[in-house]
Amino acid sequence: MIFEPLYSKMGVSGYFGPFLNEIHVNNYSLPFTYPFTLAHEMAHQYGIAPESEASLCAFIVCAESSDPMVRYSAYAFTLRYLLNDVRRILPDKYEALVSAIHPGIIADLQHNSEHWLAVRNQSLSDMQYKAYDSYLKTNQVSSGHDNYSEVVGLLISSYDLFIEK
């Protein structure tokens, strides 16, 4: 990534550059997040613009992998979105849900959060958030940056595709 330290300060783990058809994954990313981020950016490369839909594609691809680390990346990454939604929508259920999840998984998610917060620059991060939110809205993603978390709804609505019959 060109300007990788700058992107790290803004919390950008990857991006797709449409002008040169290039995918970039930030080397600052922790290894367990790399497969999901790469698959997410590849979904953009294949023309899937909304962030939630790119994350759904990344989940499907990574969850079907024969590599356990790639599968873990899919579930850990999407679990983060689910936990954020539970904390916001059902705050009284949050602690019970977290305590039901293997402590190692929670530790990985916490480590990832602390890892990115350690280099975060609040001003740059806020600026990037606003600029990208406007970019998404301009490109017909009406929920803007909030579209990332909409992957939870997509996963729930497509649950039947993932269970064995």
Image: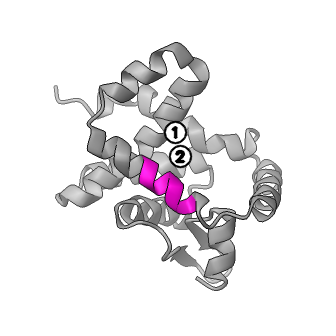
Residue 13 lies in the magenta-colored region: no
Task: Kindly report the secondary structure that dominates the magenta region of the rendered protein.
Answer: helix
Instruction: Check contact, mark 1 vs mark 2: CB within 8 A.
Output: yes
Q: Quadrant of residue 141?
A: top right
- Judging by the rendered image, the residue that carries numbered circle 1 is 151
Instruction: Specify whether 151 is left or right of 63.
Output: right
Residue at position x 66%, y 72% from top?
7
Q: Determine whether the residue tagged by mark 2 lies in a helix, strand or loop.
A: helix
> Would you place residue 51 above or below residue 38 in this image?
above
- Judging by the rendered image, the residue that carries numbered circle 2 is 53
> Would you place residue 13 above or below residue 64 in this image?
below
Q: Amino acid at mark 1?
A: Val
Instruction: Specify whether 129 is left or right of 83.
Output: right
Of badges 1 and 2, the one in the foreground is 1
Q: Amino acid at mark 2?
A: Glu
Range shown magenta: 110-116
Q: Determine whether the residue tagged by mark 1 lies in a helix, strand or loop.
A: helix
Q: Quadrant of the C terminus?
A: top left
Residue at position x 58%, y 36% from top?
150
Instruction: Specify whether 58 is left or right of 129.
Output: left
Residue at position x 24%, y 59% from top?
69
Q: Quadrant of the N terminus?
A: bottom right
Q: Is residue 59 visible?
A: no
